[in-house]
Amino acid sequence: MRTEAPELSTLTAGYRILPRVPLSGARPLRLVERNFHSSRDAWLVFVSGFFEPLFYLLALGVGVGGLVGHVRFHGHAVPYRDFVAPALLAASAMNGPVYEAGNIFFKLKYAKTYEGIVATPMTVRDIAAGEIAYTLLRGVVYSVAFVSIMLVLGLLDSAWAVLLVPAALLESAAFSGAAVFSTTLLRTWADFAFVELLTLPMFLFSGTFVPSSGYPRVMQWLLPATPLYHGVHLLRSLALGDVGIGLLGDIAYFAVMTALFLVLADRRLARLLLR
């Protein structure tokens, strides 16, 4: 009795609609590779967010810094440009993931890229991890470039400065998860105004340009709840060699933030793509 083998399309279809499986290390990297190749012609857009903190460094750290002279940081007189440069590095590590959110929004709402991806063996969790990894890649580029500028300008005197890039990457990872999750909540391009409404005050009031002790008492209580404040504190302490046990709190903050938003982004994407 002759039995016909099932058609390949049937096997493929059955394989592609299997339930979600635990995260596989290789599959998210395929999405990272796809994003990299699709954005090669838009490299200027990719690196554009790096220049804003750089211009602030040149204008305020070098220009205004010549007028300000020194500021007090943990009881020590520190040149103003040495004080502000690590904070702008923290802002640069934040900008990478935040600016990449626009591309994620376009792929989610208009290009419908993810609807095609979930028809493959990739799961929603793979998509979330892949986008966070690619968003982190943008933060890596910004962080390495900014640390290189600091090195050229002679702003790195402490031996602890070798940890600036890893610390900036930890911050970028936290903001990457938050960027992917928040993008899934946006409805139109106009909603990105809410993103700026959150990031701009953090940029201006996280101890970036003046010591946090100079803020009103209420702000001093509220600032530790914001992620950029912890990035500024962590990177500034490493750059100036003022390392203490308190930095473990900054590291723990970013570790928890990264894990939390990875879970939230996974669940939110599943709700949007598998409904």
Image: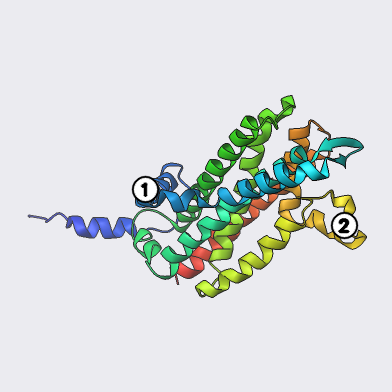
Q: Quadrant of the N terminus?
A: bottom left
> Of all residues shown, which one is farthest toward the top?
159
- Quick one: label 1, few (<14), some, or many (20+) residues within 10 Å? few
| Residue 218 to residue 42: above or below | below
The figure's colour scheme reads rainbow
Q: Position of residue 53 (x, y in %)?
A: 63, 49
Can residue 22 be seen here? no
**Residue at (65, 55) in percent of width and height:** 260
**Residue at (34, 62) in percent of width and height:** 116
- Quick one: label 2, few (<14), some, or many (20+) residues within 10 Å? some
Q: Nearer the viewer, residue 104 or 129?
A: 104
**Residue at (82, 50) in percent of width and height:** 210
Q: CA distance from mark 2 to mark 1?
A: 43 Å
Hey, what amino acid is under mark 1?
Arg
Quadrant of the rendered image containing residue 164:
top right
Q: Which residue is mark 2?
A: 215
Q: Position of residue 82 (x, y in %)?
A: 75, 37
Q: Is residue 123 left or right of residue 16?
A: right
Q: Position of residue 267 (x, y in %)?
A: 55, 63
Q: Which residue is mark 1?
A: 40
